[in-house]
Image (cartoon, rainbow, N blue to C red):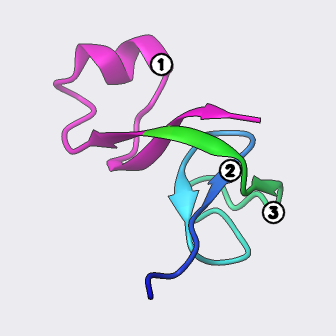
Amino acid sequence: MLPREFACKKCKALTTGKMCSVCKSTELSKDWFGILLILHPEKSKVAATLGISVPHKYALKVT
């Protein structure tokens, strides 16, 4: 069984821990939708539009 992923309410990064590895927030949600993989944020127009500067796996929508 795969570990449950949580989405950070601040930056939308996905994590399996109790703290976001991108922004260090502990405000996590188990209610999220969609996955966005950002590998090269400096080259990505999507990352620029969403304000993402760290390569990571992100949720599209977090509630």
Residue type, numbered disc 2: Cys
Q: Which residue reaches farthest front? A: 1
Residue interval drawn in magenta: 35-63
Q: Position of residue 22 (x, y in %)?
A: 55, 56
What label does residue 26 carry, if any? 3
Quick check: is 36 in the magenta stretch? yes
Q: Secondary structure at mark 3?
A: loop
The amino acid beneath tag 3 is Thr
Any magenta on residue 55? yes
Q: Residue 11 in the image: state x and y as whole percent.
A: 62, 39
| Mark carried by residue 50 | 1
Quadrant of res 32: top right
Q: In the structure shown, which secondary structural element does the residue marked by tag 1 occupy?
A: helix
Task: Tell me if residue 21 comes above or below residue 31 in the rendering.
Answer: below
Q: Residues within 10 Å of mark 1 (few under 14, many from 20)?
A: few
The one of 32 and 21 positioned closer to us in this rendering: 32
- What residue is shown with label 2? 8
Q: Is 10 left, or right, of 52 in this rendering?
A: right
Quarter holding the C terminus is top right
Q: How far, Cα to Cα, is label 2 from label 3?
A: 8 Å
Q: Quadrant of the N terminus?
A: bottom left
Q: Please state the horizontal and vertical placement of residue 54, each as a whole percent of the image.
A: 39, 45
Q: Earlier in the sequence, mark 3 or mark 1?
A: 3
Quote the CA–CA distance across marks 2 and 1. 15 Å
Mark before the other along the chain sequence, 2 or 3: 2
Q: CA distance from mark 3 to mark 1?
A: 21 Å
Please name the residue shown 72% across and 57% down the image: 30
Looking at the image, which is closer to me, 28 or 31?
A: 31
Q: Residue at x 54, y 49 (%)?
A: 13
Q: Residue at x 44, y 82 (%)?
A: 2
Q: Residue 18 vs residue 16: left or right? A: right
